[in-house]
Amino acid sequence: MKAIVKAKPERGLWMEEVPIPSPGVNEVLLKIRKSAICGTDLHIYKWDDWAQKTIKTPLIIGHEYVGEIVELGAEVTQYKIGDRVTAEGHIACGHCRNCRRGRQHICDHTVGIGVQRNGGFAEFVAVPVSNVIKVDSRIPDEIVSIMDPLGNACHTALSFPLVGEDIMITGIGGPIGSMAAAICKFAGARNILGTDLSPYRRELAKTMGADQVIDPINESIADAMKKMGMVGGFDIGLECSGSKAAFNQLIDNMYNGGKVCLLGILPPNTTVDWNKVIFKGLTLKGIYGREMFETWYHMEMMLTRGLNIAPIITHRMKADDFQKAFDIMEEGNCGKIILDWQ
């Protein structure tokens, strides 16, 4: 089969011919229809510090995809050949304290598909049946292929009640930030303000439901708040940028008693004025992946009841054109890019 492989410990990815995997006990083999490129895949492509510390080559990357079951491993009884499915990208051990108390998303021994084991940028992938999710047939293939990052947005946005609240999203122009804006609007938020440095992505965020999106360097958050009739500050903050400047700007503009979700990975040297956190009575929550599997249920229900995230998909191309796709990703003028394996 064809697969996009991190073949060598250096910048780049390579399309190679590799053996089709065989599903083990309690695994299924999927024939991939579509996959989507994630920021994690770009880190692996660029071979940055995180990738060098995390990835062991050779590795088939990719953890966002949709496919159909073509082979069942031993002991698999709950699915059948031909089922259209996707898969949760984090494989939990099932035995640690967190797994046993229903917190699989923060399992002590998580293994990432496309990170620690071969992933879905290939014509076929074998995955544990416990991670397989059969999705409502009304949801199109390309939307199913991005339910993994939609899950990050869903976990972030729905961590605290949204109805009638004023929301600030830093890094809103990224795919997860923009999808979080769509979810906030769908769930009944009052005002949604986003900040982003990219003109292209600021416009994309507006199409996804943000009321205002500003350049935080050259435009005033205070002026934006006045336009929305706000006083005091924001009730909910969603940090999706990974920028220490954006994080501190968010803290500065939170209302007393506000709640902040941290999805972006902040640099180790990030500092914060803890007096503001303490005396404002803020709640900070770290977000990792999706809550398994409640987040998947929330996504499916919203998508079948009117949530529209289609505008976040800006490019579609054949899997053979993956190099062009990664070039576009690196430039940053895109939302989600879908690779077609059919």
Image: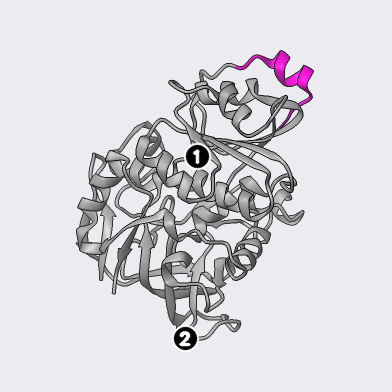
Magenta range is 272-283
Residue 67 in view in this figure: yes
Residue 263 image position (x, y, % from top left): 57, 39
Residue closest to the eye, 237 or 78: 237
Quadrant including the N terminus: bottom left
For label 1, the crowd category at 10 Å Cα-Cα, with few meaning under 14, some 14 to 19 and many 20 or more, is: many
Q: What x and y, as percent, mark residue 124?
A: 35, 71
Q: Is residue 293 left or right of residue 48?
A: right
How many marks on residues? 2
Q: CA distance from mark 2 to mark 1?
A: 39 Å
Q: Split into 4 quadrants, where in the image is the C terminus?
A: bottom left
- Say which label, 2 or 1, has the lower sequence index: 2
User: What residue did someone put label 1 on?
Assistant: 172
Q: Which residue is mark 2?
A: 81
Mark 2 or 1: in front is 1
Counting from the top left corner in percent of width and height, residue 73 is at 49, 79
Q: Secondary structure at mark 1?
A: loop
Which secondary structure, mark 2? loop
Rendered position, 233 above or below 128: above
Residue at 43 percent of width and 57 percent of height:
311
Residue type, numbered disc 1 = Ile
